[in-house]
């Protein structure tokens, strides 16, 4: 920024020296009027008019930048608000995820307890099945021995045919 001011000052100095070196009178012709004036004054007025025009163009550019800056700041504010809302939603989702994980852990424990209970029942059923098979074997053995005993038995004294 300071470099711009230095160049502008140097340019103004060169224009002023140029104007003073060309001080002879000249005729200036406007649309309806014609008059004589010093060339130095014409050069200085022209340089001043150019500076004014550039100043207005710069001012226009600054105003345009100001509007653009306001628009960008509004977008930034909007995005920050969206970011904040997204952060809040993320925190809620993470909390819900933790609750779901706890629920899954609880369900896993319940499933494990049920699996253990089923395994215990399967063990009992196996023992009962073995006991039943053993009793069936005893009953068959007793039935077979009774059947053999009846074949070999003689009728009782009171049961003669």
Image (spheres, grey):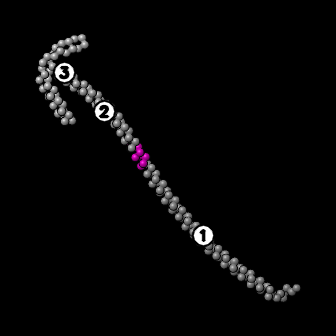
Residue in the image at 62% along x and 71% along y:
125
Q: CA distance from mark 3 to mark 1?
A: 111 Å
Pinpoint residue 157: horizontal percent, then vertical percent: 84, 88
Q: CA distance from mark 2 to mark 3?
A: 30 Å
Secondary element at image label 3: helix
Q: Which residue is mark 1?
A: 122
Kindly check if marks 3 and 1 are in contact, taking CB atoms under 8 A apart as contact.
Answer: no
The magenta segment: 84-91
Kindly check if marks 2 and 1 are in contact, taking CB atoms under 8 A apart as contact.
Answer: no
Pinpoint residue 60: horizontal percent, then vertical percent: 29, 28
Select label 2 or label 1 by which is in front: 2
Q: CA distance from mark 2 to mark 1?
A: 82 Å
Mark 2 or 1, nearer chain start: 2
Image quadrant in which you'd find residue 133: bottom right
User: Left or right of 50: which side holds 131?
Assistant: right
The relative height of residue 40 versus residue 98 in the rendered view (above or below) is above
Q: Which residue is mark 2?
A: 65
Q: Which residue is mark 3?
A: 45
Q: Is residue 89 magenta?
A: yes
Pinpoint residue 78: horizontal percent, then vertical percent: 38, 38
User: Left or right of 82: which side holds 3?
Assistant: left
Mark 2 or 3, nearer chain start: 3
**Depth check: 159 or 47 in front?**
47
Residue in the image at 38% along x and 40% along y:
79
The relative height of residue 124 versus residue 42 in the rendered view (above or below) is below
Classify 10 Å Cα crowding around label 2: few (below 14), some (14-19), many (20 and above).
few
Secondary element at image label 1: helix
Image quadrant in which you'd find residue 131: bottom right
């Amino acid at each position: 920024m300071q470099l711009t001011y230095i160049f502008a000052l140097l340019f103004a100095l060169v224009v002023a020296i140029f104007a003073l070196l060309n001080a002879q009178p000249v005729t200036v012709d406007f649309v309806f009027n014609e008059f004589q004036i010093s060339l130095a004054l014409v050069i200085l007025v022209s340089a001043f008019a150019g500076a004014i025009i550039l100043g207005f163009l710069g001012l226009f550019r600054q105003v345009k930048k100001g509007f653009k800056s306001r628009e960008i700041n509004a977008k930034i504010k909007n995005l920050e608000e969206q970011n904040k809302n997204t952060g809040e939603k993320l925190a809620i989702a993470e909390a819900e995820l933790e609750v779901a994980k706890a629920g899954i852990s609880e369900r896993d424990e319940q499933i494990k307890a049920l699996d253990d209970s089923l395994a215990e029942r399967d063990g009992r059923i196996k023992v009962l099945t073995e006991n039943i098979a053993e009793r069936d074997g005893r009953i068959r053995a007793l039935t077979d021995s009774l059947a053999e005993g009846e074949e070999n038995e003689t009728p009782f004294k009171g049961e003669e045919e």
